[in-house]
Amino acid sequence: MCIRDRFTQASNTIIETVKTHRLNNSNVAVLASKDPSPLADTYRDYIRMNSTGLRASSEYDVSENLFVISTSNIDTILNDESFAMIAFKESQLKGEFDIKNSSWKVYWFGY
């Protein structure tokens, strides 16, 4: 799968989940994977263009939902020491979405 397809599929998964569940204060991160932007800047810009109300990368601690894009399993994500995951250590895994034809997933954590 090419990077563009992975990007589009992951972004659209987040956009649809935010809209379907009417989520507020959502955020996004790319953790424990080979991606040059752990703050998910490219994803963040695209997702924000779709009226999702996505929070800034400096606002993980006031976010109510976190979408993590990763190639790692859930245990690795839960043990990640990034600012994003520290803010969501006590949250629940609300959803796990596979990115077709790739090893990438989108994890949805929320309070």
Image (cartoon, rainbow, N blue to C red):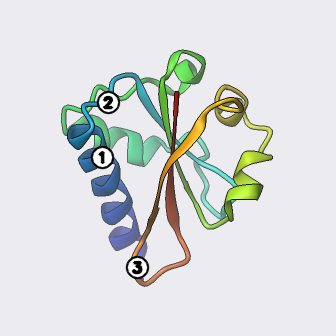
**Residue shown at 39% from the left, 40% from the top:** 44
Q: Earlier in the sequence, mark 3 or mark 1?
A: 3
Residue 86: x %, y % from top left? 73, 30
For residue 54, what is the image quadrant?
A: top left
Residue placed farthest to the top in the image? 62
Where is 69 relative to 103, above or below? above
Look at label 1 and name its amino acid.
Thr
Please report contact status of discs 2 and 1: CB closer than 8 Å, yes or no: yes
Q: Which residue is mark 1?
A: 17
Residue 42: x %, y % from top left? 41, 47
Q: Which residue is mark 3?
A: 2
**Residue shown at 40% from the left, 48% from the top:** 43
Circle 1 Cα neighbour tier, 10 Å, few/some/many (<14 / 14–19 / ≥20): some
Q: Can you tell which of label 3 and label 1 is closer to the viewer?
A: 1
Look at label 2 and name its amino acid.
Leu
For the residues marked 3 and 1, what is the alpha-carbon distance in whole angstroms?
23 Å
Please report contact status of discs 2 and 3: CB closer than 8 Å, yes or no: no
Circle 2 Cα neighbour tier, 10 Å, few/some/many (<14 / 14–19 / ≥20): some
SS of the residue at dot 3? loop
**Residue shown at 61% from the left, 32% from the top:** 91
The disc label shown at residue 23, or none: 2
Q: Earlier in the sequence, mark 2 or mark 3?
A: 3
Residue 14: x %, y % from top left? 34, 48
Q: In this image, 8 relative to 63: left or right? A: left
Q: Earlier in the sequence, mark 2 or mark 1?
A: 1
For residue 1, what is the image quadrant?
A: bottom left
Look at label 3 and name its amino acid.
Cys
